[in-house]
Amino acid sequence: MGISRTPGAGARPDHRTRLRPAARRLPALLGALLALCLALFAGAPAAQAHDELLQADPADGATLEQAPDRITLTYSGDITALGNEVRVTDSQGKTVSTGDVTVDGTHVIQRISPDAGDETYTVSWRVVSSDGHPIEGTYSFTVGQGGAGQPAVSSSAAAHDHGDHDAAEHHEHATSPAATESPEQATSSAPASAEGQSLPLWAVALIGAVGAVVLVGVIILVVALLRARRTRGADTGRETGRGSEHDDDAANGR
């Protein structure tokens, strides 16, 4: 009597289909997370390049015949409309800036009181750059012969009995370098305190969070693959045993 075999009997199922759908989707998810993380790290140098002060009017170290009616600061990028402050004070610490700061693209404008006279003024500014990071700096300029904070030179001259004329000449000599300073030199020191800023905290936190998610994704993927491999091995062993039993039964004519 011939031994009949059921078509397909003893054939081993394709265990690759047993891989869970979630495990199959993990590589794609992991790839997307890695791409996002790389994009964030690639954008980190750009985030560090915050806007900077390009020009100030009046310029740093300038000497003017009369007080200006406003301070105009020009930056390398558009300034946000919130969180900006420009304060102008005289040598005694009195504030002469008046009204709110006006933002027009890359320009920040602060008006000055019409009562401002001959003085040495300090401009302290703090603005929020286009990347959302605050930058700040200070500089000074002089109107006329300066104020109470400037005559240190003339008082020194008086102490040496050089007379009013010599004191005036000495004072003029002391202030002349600022008056003859080139525009490039006048504006170069203003943005010094705004340079070299570190990466914003929100960017650091975001990069860290994405890195943590990627790490967790890698761990989940490895665990899922190991479990799938273990399950595949167990199923293969069971199917092999069943196939052997079927062959034995067929050989014995059962």
Image: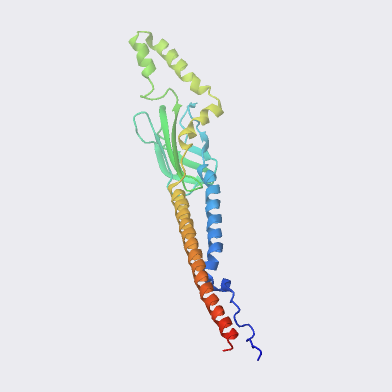
Image quarter where the C terminus lies is bottom right
Image quarter where the N terminus lies is bottom right
Farthest right residue in view: 2
Image coordinates of residue 8 in percent, x first then y, are: 63, 82
Question: Between 205 and 138, which is closer to the camera in this rendering?
Answer: 205
- The residue under the point 44% across, 36% down is 137
* 166 relative to 50 in the view: left or right: left
Residue 212 falls in which quadrant of the image?
bottom left
- State whether residue 228 appears in this view: yes
Image coordinates of residue 56 in percent, x first then y, are: 51, 34
Question: Between 195 and 125, which is closer to the camera in this rendering?
Answer: 195
Farthest bottom residue in view: 1
Q: How many marks?
A: 0
* 239 relative to 110 in the view: left or right: right
Question: Between 138 and 13, which is closer to the camera in this rendering?
Answer: 13
| Colour approach in the figure | rainbow
